[in-house]
Image (tube, grey):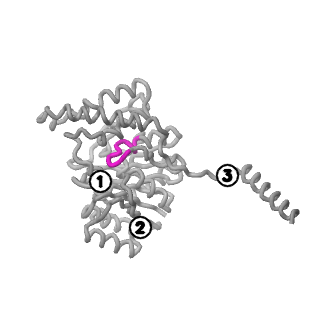
Amino acid sequence: MFSVVIATYRREQVLIDTVGALLPLLAQLDSPTELLVIDQSERHQPATTAALQQWHDQGLITWQRLSKPHLVGAMNRGLLAARGELALFLDDDIVPLPGLVQGHINCHTRYPEAWAVVGQILQPGQAPADLPQRPHPSGFWRDLDFPFNRTRGAWIENAMAGNLSVKRERILALGGFNESFPSPVASRFESELAKRLVAAGGRIRFEPGAPLHHLAAGSGGTRSAGGHLASASPHHGVGDSYFALRCARGWDRFWYLLRKPFREVRTRFHLRHPWLIPVKFLGELRALLLAWRISRRPPQLLAIPSPPSPATASATATRTTTAASNATTRR
């Protein structure tokens, strides 16, 4: 069984287009497949509801509704609900290119040591390019700037959740995705997973033969919080700051957090609207304070009970047998 999971929020026609384009790709596969749509939307337009309900009734998708929107939580719900050994997470605003799904399957077959595979992601205006992978001596910084439109495969230490397949049991053993990253943006939550995965001895493979176009739809999804360029809201930057507080140490942490506000205002927008730079700086400061508070608490990971060891199972069986014997004696 191969599972595809789409976590969606407040998306309408672009969601229908995405699902409609994926279904023929899944039908071409030799192995059984499932497509789970984890829907956090409060309501949909009638046409969207009708299409999703029809696909669900036909058994082409599994449409699950969540009462509370939370991107990372929705992805964990999909991880738990998936029945496949491999689970492929895709954004809800993509154009899948030929070979997307089969490319993930082939890559896991070719590299069985990979716990996760990231496919090629072409952002709006991007084309495939033969770009370098810049090595970095620090494990924290390694591959944070990896170009996911690259045309050559590579072992990497970063991820993007919009085109990410995982060995499901391996990721569940790690606790899944960290739900401490707050919605709606939750930036860098997949990078945090990547660092945990590598620290646990796993490997991540980038596979350009599993490509898609990301549409970056202008509404819904992570853009439900509005634009970030002129906002003093902490929601846009808190995930990035929390990632650094959780995964970086010493100078790496200090430098990442220090340069982050300046990186956020080095844009053409702020060059044309310099009076909004203090507003953005305020948002970054609020994001850092919120991230610091979140980092004081343990990460919200899935608690998956591990199977008992043979010794534990034997001891449990002995206690059960003894208890049964005593009960029989008393009777």
Mark toward the start of the polypeptide (3 vs 1): 1
Estimate the x, y position of residue 218 in percent, counting from the top left.
21, 53
Mark toward the start of the polypeptide (3 vs 2): 2
Q: Is mark 2 on a helix, strand or loop?
A: strand
Instruction: Give the labeled residue for mark 3.
Output: 308
Using the rendered image of the protein, determine whether residue 290 is visible from the camera's viewpoint: yes
Instruction: Give the labeled residue for mark 1.
Output: 221
The image quarter containing residue 236 is top left
108 relative to 329 in the view: left or right:
left
Using the rendered image of the protein, determine whether residue 142 is visible from the camera's viewpoint: no
The residue at 49%/39% (across/down) is 298
Instruction: Give the labeled residue for mark 2.
Output: 62
What is the CA distance from the residue labelled 2 to the residue labelled 1?
A: 20 Å
Amino acid type, label 1? Gly
21 relative to 112 in the view: left or right:
left
Amino acid type, label 3? Pro
Estimate the x, y position of residue 197 in percent, counting from the top left.
48, 42
